[in-house]
Amino acid sequence: MAYFYDATYILVIIGALLGLLAQAKVKGAFARYSKVYSMRGVTAEQVAEMILQQAGIRDVRIEQIGGDLTDHYSPNEKVLRLSETVYGSSSVAAIGVAAHECGHAIQHAEDYLPIQIRSTIVPVVNIGSKLAWPVIFLGLLIGMTPLANVGIILFSLIVVFQVVTLPVEFNASGRALAILRDSSYLSGDELKGARKVLSAAAMTYVAAMVASVLQLLRLVMIVGRRRD
């Protein structure tokens, strides 16, 4: 147990602080631009429906889901789910979020390579996320460094997944903003507001990746010290 209570915890703390900062920023941006409404008066789900139709995607349904900022696209179910604060809202923030999720639907329809890679490695990453910590802990507990190294490899799969996720998220936001601009769903300051919301949201993924990298570094240091 002593190996999990040492100076390397500073890396975990840094990662946690970055995550909290990113979450605070996205919530702040969303709250601010949730009060700024589109001049066109269309709601987020209406914009999403029009974007999907323009992209030739007619087999994806749009539905409301509970929670705050729980918006996501489920490719297996062909469902684009918008949270309570997004669905039915004509705010700049809501429209930006809905367009971003449409970006993911378009990525799947076009077989965008990074999202294909991410989907392919999901089963392996799920196994890694479940087994990494138990394997590392057991390896340290019984003094078996090779077993702990296996755990580190399993944990590194999480980092790989988060690295692959970055281009997927940034691309979805880029697509969303281009569509909102070109189709005149938003313009001028409205578009700038949506960009700020999506940029803040993207930073949460960057923060998560950095936190995982720092955690991975910590684990390597702990196991390496045990080996020495």
Image (spheres, rainbow, N blue to C red):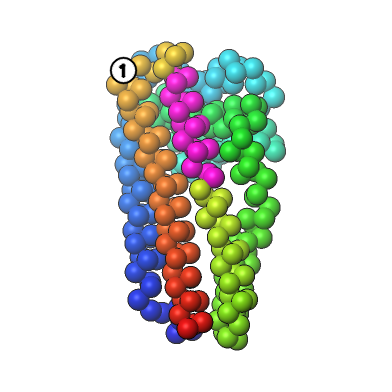
Q: Is residue 2 left or right of residue 114?
A: left
| Count of numbered circles on the image | 1
Q: Does the magenta stretch include residue 205?
A: no
Q: Is residue 167 magenta?
A: yes
Q: What stretch is highlighted in magenta?
A: 164-180
| Residue lying at 60% horizontally and 82% vertically, measured from the top left | 144
**Residue at point 43% right, 24% down?**
177
Which of the pair 8/105 is nearer the observer?
8
Q: In this view, does 165 lie to the left or right of 13?
A: right
Give neighbour class at mark 1: few <14, some 14-19, many 20+ (Cα, 10 Å): few
In this picture, is 159 found above or below 227?
Answer: above
- Residue, x 61% and y 35% (percent of image)? 113
Residue bearing the label numbered 1: 188
For residue 86, say whether it is visible. Answer: no
Magenta stretch, overall SS: helix
The answer to which quarter of the image holds residue 25 is top left
Tag 1: amino acid: Gly
Image location (x, y in percent) of residue 172: 50, 32
Residue 7 spot, x, y in % from top left: 35, 76
Task: Left or right? Give the position of 59 relative to 140.
Answer: right
x, y percent for residue 193? 33, 28
Q: What residue do we see at 63% from left, 42% from top?
A: 117
Q: Residue 68, position in %: x, y?
A: 46, 43
